[in-house]
Structure formats: structure tokens, C-alpha cells
């Protein structure tokens, strides 16, 4: 509770920086617009104005500061403009409409969740295999670790084309990329978790003459739960980033990534920014949801977070 | 027939690996390198066999030999792309973002209030899809490497910031009291005790950021770039269905990513030789 005030201070500072930046970023556009509306602008031609920086131009035209926040197509939209666009496209549009962010959000979210489920399941299975089979551990584990250093997202456009060529389109190619991204954090975390019981605990199970399967279900899996949740939180945000990036270079027509691209190509910065913030809010909500489940589960199991 | 021979190769590779893993030499360094190498080689041979025998079109999946040929034949192009994307885009952004994060962390560290705000907010920002800002930066800074460096700088900023701030707090009150008994002021304590103690954390952030830097630089090129660069080459080659070229770029990305990470890990072992995780 005692960090609420510091957090609010930092958030307020970020917003203040944003609001102040709007003025110099938009000044050139504002000056051009004001001149067309018949106002006096201090260097008189746009060419002369190009010679000045945004800050310099602001100092010469302090009267125009208010107008920088009201541009229809600003270089940097102000927070209230992004807020209105978000509110408008989330609450005031029908969910089925192509302009509704809820609709686009669901397109991205469904691919994210499908991919996350596939990636997590495969990751847990592979981790169990690695812990119980030494050959698998020695062959696969170095590759799993090395693959973390590779910019996997660069593969996204190719995977979509590859799957498209054999007739798979829509949800699944995006889900494959999401699955790929959430797969490795889960493998690495679960291997650590399944190995976390110490020798004493394993010996105790042996004195009970427990079978390997019982050892897995009654000791190793429960012991790995804190590690699993730590990986799940990394995995879900990686999945979302994967699904969004998968929409970017491939001309997808729906989803957060598609909205960002549309806003960029048709010169509607508010659309891009609203999609960006909606994606950020979705990511925050997903991570928050997993933190809640984590806290609840660990409390029920009497454990601490890894 | 193709499936059976592929399975045969898989079985043979697996058999050798199982033998090696169970043998008395399993703990030696050579075997530890040999086993993953055999596994990787098995996969490559299976890939080559399946693609050739099932006559899969190279538009869907080119065989490894074709990719290797393309790689060897296009080294000048690949090098130009590497220079544009990795050296100019990713490295510049990585250095700018890292220095900025480091500076902010040192400044914020003087106030406990700010630290308590920065840790959760920074951790939250690090989980956000910041790659999405790429089209905005490309619009602001043009399509050359400057916009890529900006995206990379923003992406690497938060992980490095959070780790540095967390690291600077990682000294015990006993250690700080000792510094005080030596009459050490703020700067002496910072340079002699707290920065060295923070190094394992800082390098953790720096290592996480290596992959992010490459992702940022490559993905940002999908939104506009001069006619050179890895992201540009990947997106145009996908359009031309020249998938062997795409794979060659991915090999470059993988090599660059591993080398970058390896470099950071090497510097880390050199700087934090005293840390338990570095003991041989």
C-alpha cells in the first residue's frame, strides 16, 4: 500500500512529460494550420519555419500553444485525444462493427490465448521429458536456451506465408507464433521448477517406495507451481506481442496490429495510438489476471512466489 | 519410404545420444557439446531428407543445403543488411537506451520515494508490447536507421532501468554501515560498494535487452526502411517467395543474437568474477 503514492507520482510525471512534449512536436503543423485560418504566425512562410526547431517556434508563437492540443491529425496526439478515441471505439461502437476496438481486440486476443494454451501445454510436456530423460536433457536443453537469444519475431512473416501456402489462414498462423514465443519461457521455468525439490524430499518419497509417476504428481509438479506462474506471466505478454507483430507485416485486416498499420498508412495517428494503448491495457489485464490466480493458488497451496 | 528413412535417422541419432548420456563420460565437456550437436545434425538431416523425398516445394520449406548455398552466395548482401540493422540500428539504440536507463537509475536511486515508484511502473512498462510504437517512430524520424535506434532504445530502456534500480538496492545494512565507519561519502559508497554489488543485476538486464534490441531493429524495418536491412530483406523476400533468402537472414539473425548475448555474458564473467554464479 505504501508504494501507491510513489507509483502515482511516476505515472503523473510520465503524463506531464507527454503533455509538455505535445506542444513542440505539433508546433509546425499548428503554425501551418493557423496561417491558413488567417492568424499571424511569426516566421511567415512554412519554409522559413522549417529552419526553427519545435521549441524555438513555440517560443516565438506562444499564442498558438492551445491549438497544438486540438489538431485533427497531430504528430503526437495529446492524452485527452487518445482517451476520447479509446472511449469512442471501445464503448460507443457496436462490438460487431469494424471500427470497434473490442472487435479487433478479440481477434488478437483469441489468437493469443489459443497460442498461449498450445505453447504452455507443449512446454510443460517437454519440461517433464527433460527432467526424466537424461538424453533429452542433454540434447534439447542447450538448444532451448540458445533459442532465447534469437529474435524469433523476425520469423513471423515467413511462418504466415508458409502456412498460407499449405492452405492454413486466419487464426492459426498467429497462434503458432504466439505458441512459439510462450513455449521457451515455460520450458526453462518448468525445468527449474521440476528440479526444485531437494535430495532430502526425493529420498523421503523413495522410502515411501513411490513410483516415478507418483513422484511427479505428488512432489515435482506441486513444487514447480511457483516457477510455472513466473513463466506464465512472461509467456502471456510474449504471446500477445507475438500475435500483434504477426498481424503487422502481413496485411491482416483485423486485430490490434492491423489497426496500428491502418492508422499509420491512412495518416490517422489517433487510430494507431488508441490501438497501442488498447494493446497495452490488454497486456496489463492479462498479466494482472495471472498475478491474481498466482496469489490465490499459492495461498491455497501454502507456498511463496518464486 | 521418406517417413521411414527419416524415422530411422531419428532413431539412430537418439540411440547414439542415449548411449552417450548414460556412458561414464557423460560429465565431460566434449560429450556435453557433442550431444546437442548430434541432435541438431539429426534434425537437419531429417529436414533435408523429408523435403527432398516428399518433394516439398521450396516455396514452402527450402532444404538446409539450399539455404547454405544461398547464404554462401549472398554474403555481401547479408553483410550490408547486418551492418544497417544490427550495427547502426540495434547497437546504437542499445547503447543509447542502456546509458539513459543507467543515468535515470542512478538519479532516482538517491530518493527512496522515486525508487519505490519506478520499480513497479518500469516492470509494468517492460511487459507492454512496445514494438507497436515502431510505426510512430518511423513516421517521426524517417525510415533510415535513426528510427530503428529510437525503437530499440525505448524497448531496452525499461528492463535495464528496473534491473539497475533493483541492483543498487541490493546491499545489506551491514555492508553500508561498514562503508560509513570508513567515513565513505555517497560517491565512494556508490563506486566502491553499491555499483559493484549491482553488476549481476545490471548484466541480467543487459542480457535480456540483447534479444529485444534485435527484435526491435528488425520489426521496425517492416514499417519502412531504405532498400537495405534485415527486416527489409525478410519482408521483400517473403513477397518474392524467395524463402531460402529469408532463412539465410534468419541464420544471420540467430548468429548475431547469440554472439551479442555471448559478448554480454563474457563481459559479465569478467566484471562479476566474484559472484557465486560465476564460480567454476
Image (spheres, coloured by chain):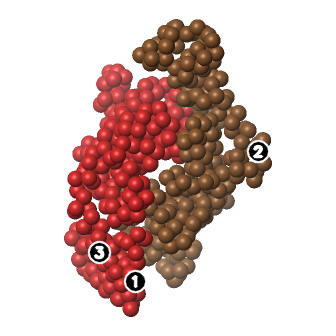
Residue A95 x/y as whole percent: 76, 51
Disc 1 residue crowd, few under 14, some 14–19, many 20+, Cα 10 Å: few
Residue at the spot of label 1: B54
Q: Which residue is mark 2?
A: A93
Write down the chain letter for disc 1. Answer: B
Circle 3: element type? helix
Residue B10 visible in image: no
- Give the spatial CA distance, label 3 vs label 2: 54 Å
Q: Can residue A159 be seen here?
A: yes
- State the red chain: B
For the point 60% across and 30% down, which residue is it?
A73
Per the rendering, the mark at residue A253 is: none
Q: Is residue A183 above or below residue B234?
A: below
Do callouts 1 and 2 mark residues in contact (Cβ within 8 Å)?
A: no
Question: Looking at the image, is mark 3 or mark 2 nearer the viewer?
Answer: 2
Crowd class of label 3 (few under 14; some 14 to 19; many from 20; radius 10 Å): few
Quadrant in the picture for residue B38: bottom left
Q: Residue A236, image x and y in percent?
A: 56, 55
Determine whether the residue tagged by mark 1 lies in a helix, strand or loop.
loop
Name the image quarter holding residue A152: bottom left
Chain A palette colour: brown
Tell me whether the residue at label 1 lies in contact with that at label 3, contact meaning CB atoms closer than 8 angstroms. Answer: no
Q: Residue at x 40, y 54 (%)?
A: B236
> Residue at horizontal 47%, vertical 15%?
A49
Q: Nearer the viewer, residue A203 or A168?
A: A168
**Which percent across, then down, holds residue B270?**
23, 45
Amino acid at each position: 500500500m505504501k508504494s501507491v503514492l510513489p507509483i502515482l507520482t511516476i505515472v503523473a510525471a510520465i503524463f506531464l512529460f507527454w503533455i509538455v512534449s505535445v506542444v513542440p512536436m505539433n508546433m509546425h503543423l499548428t503554425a501551418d494550420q493557423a496561417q491558413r485560418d488567417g492568424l499571424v504566425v511569426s516566421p511567415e512562410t512554412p519554409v522559413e519555419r522549417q529552419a526553427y526547431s519545435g521549441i524555438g517556434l513555440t517560443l516565438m508563437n506562444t499564442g498558438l500553444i492551445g491549438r497544438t492540443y486540438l489538431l485533427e491529425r497531430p504528430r503526437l496526439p495529446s492524452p485527452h485525444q487518445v482517451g476520447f478515441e479509446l472511449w469512442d471505439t471501445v464503448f460507443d461502437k457496436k462490438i460487431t462493427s469494424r471500427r470497434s476496438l473490442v472487435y479487433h481486440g478479440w481477434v488478437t486476443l483469441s489468437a493469443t490465448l489459443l497460442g498461449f494454451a498450445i505453447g504452455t501445454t507443449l512446454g510443460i510436456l517437454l519440461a517433464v521429458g527433460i527432467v526424466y530423460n537424461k538424453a533429452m536433457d542433454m540434447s534439447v536443453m542447450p538448444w532451448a536456451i540458445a533459442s532465447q537469444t534469437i529474435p524469433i519475431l523476425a520469423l513471423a512473416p515467413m511462418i504466415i506465408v508458409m502456412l498460407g501456402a499449405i492452405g492454413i489462414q486466419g487464426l492459426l498462423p498467429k497462434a503458432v507464433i504466439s505458441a512459439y514465443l510462450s513455449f521457451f519461457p515455460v520450458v526453462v521455468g518448468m525445468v527449474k521448477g521440476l528440479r526444485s525439490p531437494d535430495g532430502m524430499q526425493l529420498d523421503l518419497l523413495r522410502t515411501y517406495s513411490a513410483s516415478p509417476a507418483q513422484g511427479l504428481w505428488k512432489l515435482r509438479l506441486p513444487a514447480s507451481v511457483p516457477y510455472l506462474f513466473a513463466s506464465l506471466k512472461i509467456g502471456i505478454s510474449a504471446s500477445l506481442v507475438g500475435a500483434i507483430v504477426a498481424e503487422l507485416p502481413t496485411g491482416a485486416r483485423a486485430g490490434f496490429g492491423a489497426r496500428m498499420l491502418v492508422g499509420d498508412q491512412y495518416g490517422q495517428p489517433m487510430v494507431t495510438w488508441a490501438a497501442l494503448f488498447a494493446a497495452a491495457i490488454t497486456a496489463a489485464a492479462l498479466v494482472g489476471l495471472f498475478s491474481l490466480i498466482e496469489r490465490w493458488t499459492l495461498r491455497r497451496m501454502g507456498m511463496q512466489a518464486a | 519410404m521418406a517417413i521411414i528413412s527419416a524415422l530411422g535417422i531419428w532413431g539412430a541419432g537418439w540411440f547414439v545420444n542415449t548411449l552417450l548420456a548414460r556412458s561414464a563420460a557423460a560429465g565431460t565437456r566434449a560429450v556435453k557439446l557433442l550431444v546437442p550437436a548430434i541432435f541438431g545434425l539429426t534434425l537437419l538431416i531429417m529436414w533435408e531428407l523429408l523435403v527432398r523425398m516428399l518433394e516439398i516445394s521450396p516455396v514452402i520449406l527450402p532444404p538446409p543445403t539450399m539455404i547454405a548455398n544461398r547464404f554462401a552466395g549472398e554474403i555481401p548482401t547479408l553483410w550490408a543488411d547486418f551492418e544497417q540493422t544490427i550495427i547502426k540500428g540495434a547497437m546504437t539504440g542499445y547503447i543509447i537506451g542502456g546509458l539513459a536507463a543507467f543515468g535515470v537509475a542512478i538519479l532516482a536511486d538517491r530518493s527512496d520515494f522515486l525508487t519505490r515508484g519506478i520499480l513497479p511502473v518500469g516492470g509494468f512498462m517492460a511487459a507492454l508490447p512496445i514494438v507497436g510504437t515502431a510505426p510512430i517512430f518511423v513516421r517521426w524520424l524517417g525510415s533510415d536507421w535513426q528510427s530503428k535506434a529510437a525503437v530499440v532504445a525505448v524497448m531496452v530502456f525499461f528492463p535495464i532501468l528496473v534491473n539497475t534500480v533493483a541492483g543498487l538496492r541490493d546491499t545489506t545494512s551491514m555492508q553500508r554501515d561498514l562503508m560509513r565507519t570508513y567515513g565513505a561519502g555517497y560517491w565512494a559508497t556508490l563506486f566502491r560498494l553499491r555499483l559493484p554489488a549491482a553488476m549481476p543485476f545490471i548484466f541480467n538486464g543487459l542480457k535480456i535487452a540483447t534479444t529485444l534490441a534485435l527484435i526491435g531493429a528488425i520489426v521496425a524495418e517492416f514499417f519502412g526502411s531504405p532498400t537495405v536491412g534485415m527486416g527489409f530483406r525478410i519482408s521483400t523476400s517473403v513477397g518474392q517467395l524467395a524463402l531460402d533468402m529469408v532463412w539465410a537472414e534468419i541464420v544471420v539473425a540467430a548468429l548475431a543474437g547469440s554472439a551479442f548475448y555471448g559478448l554480454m555474458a563474457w563481459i559479465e564473467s569478467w566484471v562479476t568474477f566474484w559472484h557465486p554464479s560465476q564460480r567454476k
